Amino acid sequence: MPSLIEIRNLSKFYRRGEQRIPVLVDINLDVMEGDFLALMGPSGSGKSTLLNLIAGLDRPTAGVLRVGGVDIAALPESALADWRAAHVGFVFQFYNLIPVLTAFENVELPLTLTPLSRQERRQHVELVIELVGLGDRKTHYPRQLSGGQQQRVAIARALVTDPMLIVADEPTGDLDRASAAEILELMERMNEDLGKTIVMVTHDQRAADKAHYVQHLDKGELSERVEVLARTP
Amino acid sequence: MAFLLRLMWRNIFRQKLRVGLTGLGIVIAVIAFALLRTLVDAWYAGVNASSSSRLVTRHAISLGFSLPIHYQQKIRQVSGVSGVSFAVWFGGIYINEKNFFPQFAVEPSTYFNLFPEFAIEPEERAAFLHDRKGALVGRKLAAQYGWKVGDTIPLRGTIYPGEWNFVVRGIYHGAERGSDESMFFFHYANLNENLKKLGDSRADHVGIFFVGIDKPKRAAEISAAIDELFKNSLAETFTETEKAFQLGFVAMTETIVMAVRIVSMVVIVIIMAVMANTMAMSARERIGEYATLKALGFGPVWIAALIVGESLILALGAGGVGILAAFPVVDRVAELLGRFFPVFMLSGRTIWMAWAAALVVGMAAAVFPAYKAATVSVSEGLRSL
């Protein structure tokens, strides 16, 4: 089976004045379709940078980065934005919902970039909002929802365009244990029931235990992959 | 598009106090702008109301010198002249000096033919023509002092000393929107008779002649012909179009008009800075949201449109309220300044300028925040959360 994500000799440097600071060095990684990968490592190890590169939010300094067979590093800015809208779902640590939009409208947001009619958009949103168990919270604004509920709205927003890849940056980092467990369960369902490929950055071992395998990053270098043998129920 | 508009609208009211104060600032600025521009218009009211088919002939040295009344017949004979009348500035005081209004001694039979913008009821016109002690007053002036037809108006002469009593025989109204309705006319024959009785050398002399012409494009040629008639006489003349004559008055106060114009622009620049600050603060607070929208696939143009639209809705909304509020404010100021500015009203041009000012404020205030939000890198913007 071909890799959904194919990374070869990828490096990322930042410039600070004359200094060239390496963030990722010579990374090689393959993620298959349907995989659930957890990226772990200490703060500043380059996890979020790698995630941003995979999601097309940033560009590598060197190397090859193909997602779904597309060399996304070579895409111009507008094409990259279109690619993200069509193929990537995002789940952020702080949910990143638009405060002036209701849960329903937040989920509908990515669909406004598609040619779907209002009626079709409504059907899609209803479906995913029910899927994440927030059918009775559609008209609520983010401030009227708990952290766990907000993250579920964010997951619904990530799913609504039916992307091939979900990237999650510490999705449980701002949640209490019970809410975190619910979110992880939801992500597991996304992967197993819907077949979504997930790349998740986390500090939380319990979150990592939900993944198929874990890779550690340290000082910009990627370790060998570790299979998660006994995934937590 | 509908979604974008909905998001713009809701974003506006996120910081209610801030947007309320900014909106109030725009409303006040637009009212001030409209008021100042109306003041400039009022300054030029005489110029705007002047007719292209009228010339003004005055003494070549200055307006302070009068011209012999018999010039009227000579001017009438110039080719292209359709009618000639004259006026004398009276400068009387009604009760006290505060009650200023322009008073002119005119020849009614010719004067009102040249000034059709002063509309008079036929019976009132006839009554005025037949009463040498009669007066014709403007609608605004009559309203200001509560005068009615039949009232006797006492004026204390300053240029022409003595106590003068006039009976209001008619009240004219402006046939056009910008016509002056604050003037007081009476018979020149009445004034001249008194001057003759007193043996005053100013008898049979007038201040200016108004000359009606058939073809406005011949104004320069006819003006030259009139002045040629009186060349090398004791009272040489200077003839110009009525517009140029009125502009001559405005030119004397050009510096004030310029200052008012500059202040009206400064008001707009100040509110532009306030509005730009509001938009910059809002955009800075939401930079993480813009980064999220970009991550989801929204392009920089969409993000910029969101900010520019929000700024325009606020500026044009508040600007519209300011324009509506300017009407009663201008009316009230017109009442207060009526004796200095007989025509003080919000013009269509001022309204359009106020709209344009609001549009420019909205656009200019959004340029920098929109550029910043549109160009911020997604990863950098997300870190700001």
Image (spheres, rainbow, N blue to C red):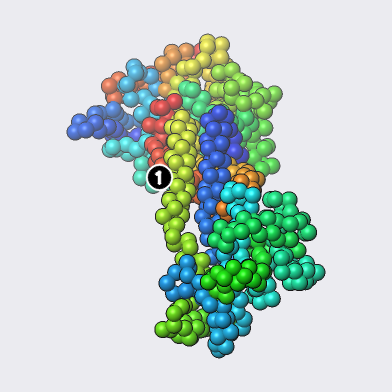
Residue drawn at x 44%, y 74% as measured from the top left: B60
| In the depicted structure, whether residue B43 falls above or below residue A229 | below
| In the depicted structure, whether residue B380 falls above or below residue B172 | above
Q: Residues within 10 Å of mark 1 (few under 14, many from 20)?
A: some
Q: Amino acid at mark 1?
A: Glu
The answer to which of B271 and B261 lies nearer the viewer is B261
| In the depicted structure, whether residue A163 falls above or below residue B172 | above
The answer to which of B291 and B31 lies nearer the viewer is B31
Q: Residue furthest left?
A: A18
Viewed as shown, does residue B227 lie left or right of B181? left
Across and down, in percent, residue B376 comes to: 39, 37
Name the image quarter holding residue A104.
Answer: top right
Residue drawn at x 51%, y 80% as measured from the top left: B219
The answer to which of A91 and B204 lies nearer the viewer is B204
Across and down, in percent, residue B208 comes to: 54, 72
Residue drawn at x 40%, y 20% as measured from the top left: A214
Say which element carries label 1.
Answer: helix
Specify the subunit that label 1 lies on: A
Residue drawn at x 44%, y 25% as measured from the top left: B385
What residue did someone put label 1 on?
A77
Viewed as shown, does residue B292 lie left or right of B152? left
Across and down, in percent, residue A77 comes to: 40, 45
| In the depicted structure, whether residue B190 falls above or below residue A29 | below
